[in-house]
């Protein structure tokens, strides 16, 4: 039987702070395929997330189909807005939610992974990070600071992670990031520069596929996932309406699931996808293919073939 086998691989998944997002689903599928998984968690959410695990509050979400459960090899506090401690303002370093973590920057976490597991210890790197401080503002009302903040946290952080973790890569590493269709099409209400950040992320995927491929033999791919009601996505304020709209107007008229995104990531990180790099793979029930909404009523359903 042909199956995804990641036995002996170690993954680092950045952007896991609960059991409701794509990062968690990806971590779970990588582990179910045999990989060991470390995660990076935003420092303000670190204590809450680790307590949820310790108290068994998300135990059901950790269960694998067919038996077994997800466990994290390490959980690191990581704030992807910062490359090194020298970039961190004093007020953040002194914040009580950060002070407990000696170095929560991207380079600091990469250094911690090296200390914990050695020089060549990472096979899979997943970027499941996005933040736009002004995401609810239309682009015309977005400040320069808000726009650049979205670009920093949601796009440049992937470049920074690739650079900092590259010395840890074993042979044939696989890198995956997560995008959204607003990178290519206008989504009113998805503001604050986030659409630009997703477009940059997809462009960087192609460039990193070349640069990291030439330098490290790495494959770099992007998953453009459909609308999903994660806690982070709920910040934009209309995610449920977006899910309902895309469900009605997709070639497969169903909402996506985090499981589908997790399974796609596991495939892309496996030897089965050894020829795929520099690609943006859509997991959206085909919504991105539509030129006009089915709601417009211009044509009937295909129905059953005669």
Image: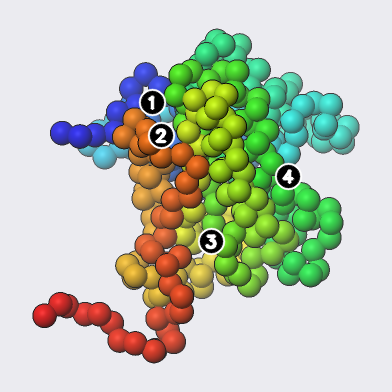
Please report contact status of discs 2 and 1: CB closer than 8 Å, yes or no.
yes
Q: CA distance from mark 2 to mark 1?
A: 10 Å
Q: Which secondary structure lies at badge 2?
A: loop
Task: Tell me the crowding category of disc 1: few under 14, some 14 to 19, or many 20 or more residues within 10 angstroms, Cα based.
Answer: many
Q: CA distance from mark 1 to mark 3?
A: 29 Å
Coordinates of residue 294 in the picture (x, y in percent): 40, 81
Give coordinates of residue 17: x percent, y percent: 56, 40
Residue 224, horizontal then vertical, whole percent: 49, 53
In the picture as drawn, the residue positioned furthest to the left comes out as: 306
Q: Residue at x 48, y 50 (%)?
A: 280
Q: Which residue is mark 3?
A: 181
Q: How many angstroms separate mark 4 from mark 1 (CA)?
A: 29 Å
Is residue 13 rendered to the left or right of residue 101? Answer: left
- Mark 2 or mark 1: which comes first in sequence? 1
**Which of the 4 image quadrants contains residue 270?**
top left
Q: Which colour scheme appears in the figure?
A: rainbow
Residue linked to disc 1: 35
Residue 117 horizontal side relative to residue 45, left or right:
left
Query: Disc 4 on helix, strand or loop?
Result: helix
**Which quarter shows the C terminus?**
bottom left
Mark 2 → mark 3, Cα distance in angstroms: 22 Å
Q: Of the residues tagged 4 and 1, which is closer to the observer?
A: 4
Q: Which element is circle 3 on?
A: helix
- The answer to whether the residue labelled 1 contacts the one labelled 3, judged by CB atoms less than 8 Å apart, is no
Mark 2, residue position: 269
Left or right: 203 as drawn, with respect to 54:
right
């Amino acid at each position: 039987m042909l199956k995804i086998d990641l036995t002996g691989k170690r993954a680092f998944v950045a952007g896991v702070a609960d059991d409701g997002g794509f990062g968690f689903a990806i971590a779970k599928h990588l582990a179910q395929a045999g990989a060991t998984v470390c995660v990076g968690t935003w420092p303000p959410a670190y204590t809450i997330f680790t307590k949820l695990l310790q108290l068994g509050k998300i135990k059901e979400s950790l269960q694998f189909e067919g038996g077994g459960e997800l466990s994290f090899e390490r959980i690191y506090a990581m704030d992807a807005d910062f490359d090194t401690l020298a970039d961190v303002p004093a007020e953040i370093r002194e914040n009580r939610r950060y002070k407990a973590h000696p170095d929560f920057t991207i380079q600091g976490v990469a250094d911690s992974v090296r200390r914990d597991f050695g020089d060549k210890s990472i096979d899979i790197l997943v970027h499941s990070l996005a933040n736009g401080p002004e995401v609810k503002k239309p682009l015309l009302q977005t400040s320069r600071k808000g726009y650049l903040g979205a670009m920093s946290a949601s796009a440049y952080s992937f470049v920074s992670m690739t650079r900092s973790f590259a010395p840890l890569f074993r042979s044939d590493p696989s890198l995956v990031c997560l995008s959204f269709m607003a990178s290519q099409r206008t989504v009113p209400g998805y503001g604050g520069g986030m659409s630009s950040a997703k477009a940059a992320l997809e462009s960087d995927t192609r460039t990193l596929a070349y640069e990291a491929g030439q330098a490290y033999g790495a494959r770099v791919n992007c998953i453009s996932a459909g609308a999903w009601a994660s806690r982070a996505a709920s910040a934009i304020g209309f995610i449920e309406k977006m899910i309902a709209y895309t469900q009605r107007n997709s070639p497969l008229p169903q909402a996506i699931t985090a499981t589908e995104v997790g399974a796609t990531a596991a495939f892309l990180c496996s030897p089965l996808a050894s020829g795929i790099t520099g690609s943006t793979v859509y997991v959206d029930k085909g919504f991105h293919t539509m030129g006009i909404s089915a709601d417009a009523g211009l044509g009937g359903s295909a129905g059953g073939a005669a």
